[in-house]
Amino acid sequence: MPRRWLHRLYEYFALWFGLALLGVISLTWTLLAVPLYYVLPKRWAVPLGRWASTTGFRIYLGALSLIGACRFDLSALDSLRDEGPMIVAPNHPCLLDALMVISRLPNMACIMKVDIVDNVFLGAGARLAGYIRNDAQLSMIRQSVAELKSGSQLLIFPEGTRTTRWPINACKGTAALIASRARVPIQTVLIETDSAYLGKGWPLFRRPPMPITYRIRLGRRFAPQEKAGTFTEDLERYFIDELHDAPHFLPPDAPQAAESRAARL
């Protein structure tokens, strides 16, 4: 059998193994998280839930590395662990982004889409960890500010969804608004990958070429500003400049951020 067919079989094995492992980890924790959510007081439940998320995601990513499906370089995040309240703001190439960040930062609150919080596999663990739903804007902002003032770090993707425009979508003003109200900095995080796997529109069961490389590096830390609109423009411009020469994971015909920005001027 030609070597390329053997490699393709390995890629299918790695794909299905990874999905099955994530399902097993998530379902196992869900069975434990549901009763714990109703039994434990919040002051115990939230730290336990976040520790479990960090541990579970770290095991999962470690398994993907062990079987050779992915190569992760996430060590840059470790320096943020003891730096106190801040908004951690990465670009968003794929569904693994939140897992990568949370796997390194255990005191991390996270704004999550409501369909994830309501998901049978992920919802119970997200609620136990005190993650924040994004379906009610005012409540989301109040909860986010409260988390930061209590000493937590907060994960927000400024794009609001996975990247479809190279190198980053237009940034939304949520991160800037929360930073201004909580008086905390925004630490940009730059996620680089050589694959479109689990990007916007990628079918869950579609096999990607492997191994996939993910690298995280820390970007500029922005002090909070009063004018959220200007702050958001500065943030978007910074991401565009920093990621312009990163590995290109979008199709060649994807919209370009520089062209889109010029069209608005």
Image: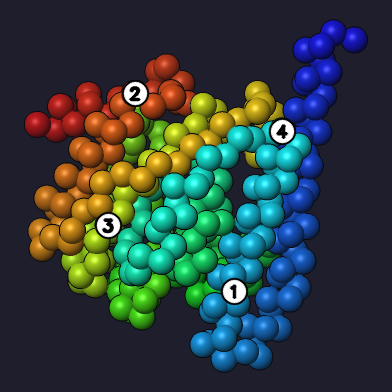
SS for callout 2: loop
Q: Which residue is mark 1?
A: 49
The CA span between labels 3 and 2 is 23 Å
Asked whether 255 or 234 is in front, the reply is: 234
Disc 3 vs disc 4: Cβ atoms closer than 8 Å?
no
- Marks 2 and 4 close (CB-CB < 8 Å): no
Taking the image as shown, residue 152 lies to the left or right of residue 262, namely: right
The numbered mark, 3 or 4, whose residue comes first in the sequence reads: 4
Q: Is residue 127 visible?
A: no
Assess whether mark 1 and mark 4 are in contact (beta carbons under 8 angstroms).
no
Amino acid on which disc 3 is placed: Ile
| Residue denoted by label 4 | 68
Alpha carbons under labels 1 and 2: distance apart: 37 Å
Which residue is drawn at the image coordinates 32% and 64% (left, top)? 86
Query: Residue 80: percent from the left, percent from the top?
Result: 40, 58
* Residue underneath mark 2: 245
Q: Dividing the image into 4 quarters, which one contains the N terminus?
A: top right
Q: Position of residue 131 (x, y in %)?
A: 49, 70
Question: Which comes sooner in the sequence, label 3 or label 2?
Answer: 3
Tell me the residue that label 3 is attached to: 186
What colouring method underlies this structural image?
rainbow
Q: How far is disc 1 from disc 3 in space, using C-alphas?
A: 24 Å
Residue lying at 33% horizontally and 61% vertically, measured from the top left: 87
Q: What is the distance, in whole Å, between disc 3 and disc 4 at their CAs?
A: 34 Å
Q: Secondary structure at mark 1?
A: helix
